[in-house]
Amino acid sequence: MLALLFSTVLAFAAPSDADMVKMLTVIDDRQQNTGDYKSLVYIENKEAGKSDLVYQAVIYRRDANDQLVILFVKPQSEAGKGYLRLDNNLFLYDPTVGKWDRRTERERIGGTGSNRQDFDQSRLHEEYAPTFVAEEKLGQYQVEHLKLKMIPGKDVAYPVCDLWVDKSTGNVLKRQDYADSGKLLRTTYYPAWNKVFSKSKNAEVYFPKEIRIIDEVEKGTQTTVVIQEVALDALDPNIFTKAWLESKSR
């Protein structure tokens, strides 16, 4: 009887700090490519009392150098507008005024509920320290619920977040982001994941097929991001420059 009780306790033992850091590292590594990354994304924003916003953008990433470009291509009124991440700084280029502005990590991309972290590579194990909350059920999934707190000195959109990780696949299924005060700011769901083989990494690179973002402050506001046409071919290094982004609106 004691042996059975002991084995049951072991089966539900919380993961160690090292185990949780490893879990975050695996999540990050699966989404990173040793080479480059390009994808076509659709962003739809619904807000009560306003017309829906629908954008089409191309995402360019060079994970080895932490570089990111978000270039809007549709609608025509937004074509040529874009974001550039350089040396931990996020810049917005508006071709209508020919001006660059530095933006914060919480910048609402295109005025939607999405921000930089939804399109950039994952850096959870570098930016957050995890603690274990519980093993739970999330719908039909058995998940591990972690609470993440920002590592001092890191520049992130949200200092605290909760993460629900599918035990069977290791994929993130749900995330909730909080302000320093503890106020819930947004809830994000990842209903499905996809993967593509990377020759440079010699392994699969995972990406969410769809991201559903619920604004917990502005009730009734939701953003859906659909990621399509992912390619891992080498990109021209000039893409990750202000000059290149400026040229796309000429």
Image (cartoon, helix red, strand yellow):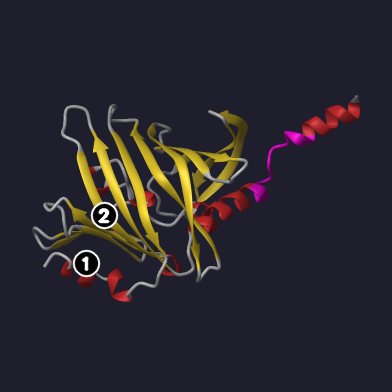
Classify residue 48 as left or right of residue 217.
left
Q: As shown in the figure, which amino acid type bears the numbered disc 1?
A: Leu
| Count of numbered tags | 2
Mark 2 neighbour class, 10 Å CA radius: few under 14, some 14 to 19, many 20 or more: many
- Please tell me which residue is depicted at 43% across the width and 33% down the height of the picture: 182
- Please tell me which residue is depicted at 39% across the width and 58% down the height of the picture: 230
Quadrant location of residue 14? top right
- The quadrant of the image that shows the N terminus is top right
Quadrant location of residue 232? bottom left
| Location of residue 146 with respect to 109 vertically, above or below | above
- Check disc 2 and report its element: helix, strand or loop: strand
Instruction: Give residue 245's mark.
Output: 1
- Please tell me which residue is depicted at 41% across the width and 65% down the height of the picture: 66
Q: Nearer the viewer, residue 218 or 119?
A: 119
Cα distance in 3D space between marks 1 and 2: 13 Å
Residue 236 placed where, x, y %? 32, 75
Q: As shown in the figure, which amino acid type bears the numbered disc 2?
A: Ala
Considering every residue shown, the one lying at the far left of the view is 97
- The quadrant of the image that shows the C terminus is bottom left
| Location of residue 100 with respect to 157 vertically, above or below | below
Give the residue pinned by disc 2: 57
Based on the picture, tell me whether residue 235 belongs to the magenta stretch: no
- Check disc 1 and report its element: helix, strand or loop: helix
- Please tell me which residue is depicted at 42% across the width and 69% down the height of the picture: 65
Magenta highlight range: 10-19
Residue 121 placed where, x, y %? 43, 57
Based on the picture, tell me whether residue 12 belongs to the magenta stretch: yes
Residue 156 placed where, x, y %? 40, 50
Q: Earlier in the sequence, mark 1 or mark 2?
A: 2
Considering every residue shown, the one lying at the far top of the view is 1
Classify residue 85 as left or right of residue 169.
left
Mark 1 neighbour class, 10 Å CA radius: few under 14, some 14 to 19, many 20 or more: many
